[in-house]
Amino acid sequence: MSIAATTARQVTLATGKSKDKTPVSLAFLIALWFSMFFGVLVLLALIVNTAIDGSTRFDSELLTNYASIVRPESSGFRAGILGSLWLMVFTALLAVPLGISAALYLEEFADPTTRWNRFVEVNLQNLAAVPAIVYGLLAVAIMALLGFQNAGIVLGGALALALLILPVIIITTREAVRAVPREIRQGSLALGATVWQTTWRQTLPSAIPGIATGTILGLSRAIGEAAPLVVVGLAGSVLFDPEGVMSRITALPMQIYSLTSNSREELQQAASAAIIVLLVMVLGLNALAIFIRNKFQRSW
Amino acid sequence: MSTSATAGPTGPSSGTGLSAAVDLSPKSRPGERVITVVLQLSAYASIAITFGIIAALIQPVTEFFSEVPFGDFFAFDGTYAVLPLVTATLMVTLIALLVAVPLGLGAALYLSEYASRRARKILKPTVELLAGVPSVVYGFFALTFVTPTLLQEILALDVGFTNALAAGLVLGVMIIPTIASLAEDAFSAVPQAMRQGSLAMGANRMQTSLRVVFPAALSGVAAAVVLGMSRAIGETMIVTLAAGALKQFSLDPRDGMQTMTGFMATTAGGENPVGSVAYNNLFAVGMLLFVITLVLNLVSISFVRRFRQVY
Amino acid sequence: MASATSADTFPNMSSLGEAHVDNERRLPAKPVNPVMETRDLNVFYGDFHAVHDVNLSYGRHEITAMIGPSGCGKSTVLRCLNRMNDLVPGARVDGEVLYHGQDIYEKRVDPIAVRTQIGMVFQKPNPFPKSIYDNIAYGPRVTGMKVDNMDDLVEEALNGAALWDEVKDKLKQSAYGLSGGQQQRLCIARTIATKPDVILMDEPCSALDPIATARVEDLMLTLRNEYTIIVVTHNMQQAARVSDRTAFFTARPDETTGNRTGLLVEYDLTSTIFSAPGDKRTEDYISGRFG
Ligand SMILES: Nc1ncnc2c1ncn2[C@@H]1O[C@H](COP(=O)(O)OP(=O)(O)OP(=O)(O)O)[C@@H](O)[C@H]1O
Ligand SMILES: [Mg+2]
């Protein structure tokens, strides 16, 4: 009996690593690999396919011309690109200060009792998962309250996108702030600094990389989003540059969306090329966020 | 007796004369007060958004139901019937989950059980990139590649120009990171000791992953699936483009069918005057969508809390 | 109950007198005109009664050590002395903490003002992620101290903490580049830069090696001339080496709940505590027999 057990153990030891090399476990590992890389392969297929479709239109007119149905071969996305940039700036202006202020209050000032915290936590997590299109409805209602008949302007679009990314900014800012060690705060408070001085001079500067990462990721989500913009009534195409917050605009994803209903070959190609432009913007922001995270984030 | 414990030879300590020199009275810090109030208002405003959404929806929704009876809304037929939209949403979501659940969980298992720390540092953001791609881009891809090339040409399926299958498949790819990320958190939260116990008993890594780690993280897996479902239900542009704008009740994924979000996007983009019944219909569907996703989100959050509590 | 406790706490009261004056420093048996004093101090964390009826006085220009087994509430008492306990959620303080006769827990007292008078050095060195210079200048800046020349103040504080010679060429470099012992002395320098009256130290050397510890101890003895120092330590030799007076705490389990509540056992001149402790528990603890 005991001899058998010993032998069995020796066998197991002898085979050691190769336990993971049975056909079944290898198949399992391959399945996991497949799961891991399937999405990436789809993304590659998407990019390659779109780039090929749009390859005829990688010219400067794509960026500098307005949309044109009369001359589809030189139709461009100037209005959409400018619109998206304007939206990004105003979304950031609305959402970033508000989000950071809210996060700082919740982390550094608010009542720390578990019940209140749990309420806040659940609330924010839910808001982060509310469908984007619902924020469009909320933005329409707020614009109406503010007295705007037409919400399809810079302000309306930026409001919808700001509402959309606000929970993301709050959540990531809270995480970044929480990662700053307690000892730093205590050191500051013990010197006679106030809570706000401690927050402003110690916690916030240390949390900046994390906040920047979260904010940029939020903004990259915002400029790719079309659903809330459809709801606030952003145009699919305009033939002028944005001039101010009250200016009617379109956005790059809106322009792409509106082109899908048009089956003209040239316009499909233009849409493909525009998608590459949008992907460069969005993935570029993603890369920037990851770069900041890896380069500046301090591990305490 | 009890007071003499701290009393010095010259009597109570308070007689030092120095006390007047030390000013401990509160300083007024008006700037600080203002800042605190501003921060507080920001926080409350942000949290109030949940209630803001409900408030924004309530007025058009009540107006809608004052003109359209409940029964006409929760019906399969008729101008204002919502149930075909709901079944279409469920159909697309189901297809998406069939794609995203196995792939998302597989990726999560790989990341937490097999990948080295360095590999994880690269692979995680790569997978998360999938969620960063704008949904209009996915929609365009479904419409111009998945349906005509993949489904019609390569697989020779008899699908329509718009169909639930293409929308569901692409939507599934989009929510892989949602599921993978939350599930990986759950897998990683399983204590190392449980793995070592299993490995010590002679199980290999596959057996450990499937029989120890996976069951131990079950509530986290549930949270991930439910959150993925909520995301799929709320996603708009893919389904608007790829599943089509035809409101119909169908159980055939090869058909085009309009989902709730697809309906909202189409209606909002249309020419309905503000305040008209058709326009308010948008808010009624929006309210239903909000309630459904709210419930799913709360379920997911409570599952997450459960696995955070256990370990 | 109250009289029982005080008898418990000061069993050798009756023998107080000239015999207990410290040979070296010639200190009176009890602090005269103490800088700080706690009266019937009780601290609760939620429902948990952490510290029971602590009566202590801290003498001017003296080093008072607080010793005792882990969890007996030393840090808790220390944190009460500059209202750092305010920052602990659920913490509640009963009784009085007098600073120059003024109860710092009184309603009209500003905790910020208290902390500028009563500085604190922590167990783990916690320099700010800033330059050495900015670490020192931070306190004066935030408290709005009137400073004629910040450079002079920084030099003075670093000199006061016996760190100037080591860092004078790298004031603009990050404080994180310093060794653990240097970081801790930087934290002390940072504290004295705001010109406090009292310095609280919670196990300031427990994260340091013996050489760094010796330097900090020397520093404490120098600082005693200008400041009043209250130090929590687990190191009995340290208490014996640096402190003028020693308070010994222990934790007593509650009969009903089993919660361990901290209380003061004995307070006396350090020489007395270490040569002729009046309480069996002190003796056991000091001689290494944990009780
Ligand atoms: N923030 C807190 N919340 C709840 N309980 C606490 C907190 N801080 C301390 N306690 C409890 O109060 C008691 C006294 O803790 P304290 O840290 O004052 O002990 P200590 O004597 O400093 O111990 P040590 O020598 O280990 O530092 C302990 O039982 C501890 O668990
Ligand atoms: Mg302690």
Image: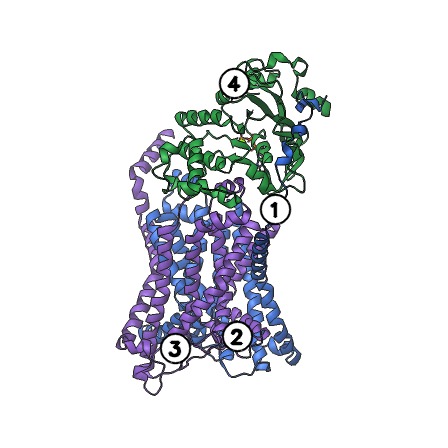
Chain colours: A purple, B blue, C green
Q: Disc 1, disc 3: CB below 8 Å? A: no
In x, y percent, where is residue B175?
43, 63
The answer for how far apart the CA atoms under marks 4 and 3 are is 81 Å
Residue that badge 1 annotates: B27
Whether residue B233 is visible? no
Q: Residue drawn 32% across and 63% down?
A: A41
The answer for how far apart the CA atoms under marks 2 and 1 are is 62 Å
Residue that badge 3 annotates: A79
- Horizontally, residue B112 falls left or right of residue B56, namely left
The answer for how far apart the CA atoms under marks 1 and 3 are is 54 Å
For mark 1, name the chain.
B
In x, y percent, where is residue B9?
67, 20
- Which mark's residue is nearer the viewer, 2 or 4? 4
Mark 2 close to ligand 1, CB under 8 Å: no
The answer for how far apart the CA atoms under marks 2 and 4 are is 77 Å
Element carrying mark 4: loop
* Quarter assignment of residue C282: top right
In the image, which disc is placed on residue C288?
A: 4
| Quadrant the N terminus of chain A occupies | top left
- Which mark's residue is nearer the viewer, 2 or 1? 1
Which residue type carries mark 3? Ala
Q: Disc 2, disc 4: CB below 8 Å? A: no
